[in-house]
Image (cartoon, rainbow, N blue to C red):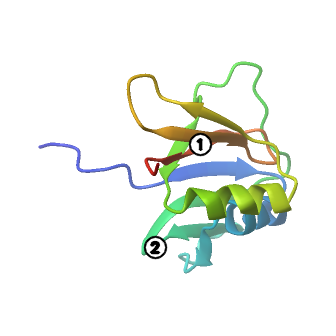
Amino acid sequence: MTIAYLDHVNIRTGALDRLVHFYCEIIGLTEGPRPDFPFNGAWLYCGDQAAVHLIEVDETPTAETPSLEHFAFVGTDRAAFVGRLEAADYPFRSVFVPGTKIEQIRLQDPDGNQLHVDFTES
């Protein structure tokens, strides 16, 4: 057996609507079908894949030193993505991976989870 790919990331949040807005309007995912679980949440899609699962809890969990450092997406059309961040006045920083042509656009979601979107465009 081999691992084929990462299926999704699951995030617990006390601010479901705020995170749905961030991942859809800022990152560019779309909200889609979700099984009828006995708890509230949302599944956010990257194409046909439910990549981010959100679960609503009473309070957003906090951790001084999180064990999950970040997660990442691969993006296309860097200019459009950065333009969306700038139009929303959403803070980010650009970092190039040493020895590659990969540019990471790094940011945090409203709950403080770190993520980046990677671009290989020139």
* Quadrant location, the N terminus: top left
Find the distance from the CA under tag 2 to the CA under tag 1.
18 Å
> 93 or 31: which is nearer to us?
93
Question: Given the image, on which type of amino acid does mark 2 rest?
Answer: Gly
Q: Secondary structure at mark 2?
A: loop
Residue at point 59%, 25% (across, down): 67
Question: Label 2: which residue?
Answer: 47
User: Disc 1 marks which residue?
Assistant: 116
Looking at the rendered structure, the kind of residue marked 1 is: His
Q: Is residue 83 above or below residue 102?
A: below
User: In terms of depth relative to the viewer, which is nearer, 13 or 113?
Assistant: 113
Residue 74 drawn above or below residue 63: below
Q: Locate residue 84 relative to residue 96 in the image: left or right.
A: right
Residue drawn at the location 75% of the way across and 47% of the way down:
109
On the image, the x and y values in percent for residue 80 come to 64, 64
- How packed mark 2 is, by other alpha carbons closer than 10 Å (few <14, some 14-19, many 20 or more), is few
Instruction: Name the outermost residue toward the top.
Output: 65
Q: Is residue 116 left or right of residue 99?
A: right
Instruction: Tell how many labels.
Output: 2
| Side of 91 where 47 appears, left or right | left
Task: Please provide percent x and percent y for residue 120.
Answer: 43, 47
Residue 21 rendering spot, x and y as whole percentages: 78, 66
- Residue 86's label in the rendered image is none
Q: Residue at x 66, y 25 (%)?
A: 66
Residue at 85% from the left image edge and 46% from the top image edge: 59
Q: Which of the pair 61/81 is nearer the observer?
A: 81
Q: Quadrant of residue 25?
A: bottom right
Q: Is residue 35 above or below residue 54?
A: below
* Element under disc 1: strand
Sequence-wise, which precedes: disc 2 or disc 1? 2
Q: Estimate how packed mark 1 is, as few (under 14), some (14 to 19) or many (20 or more) residues with alpha carbons within 10 Å.
A: many
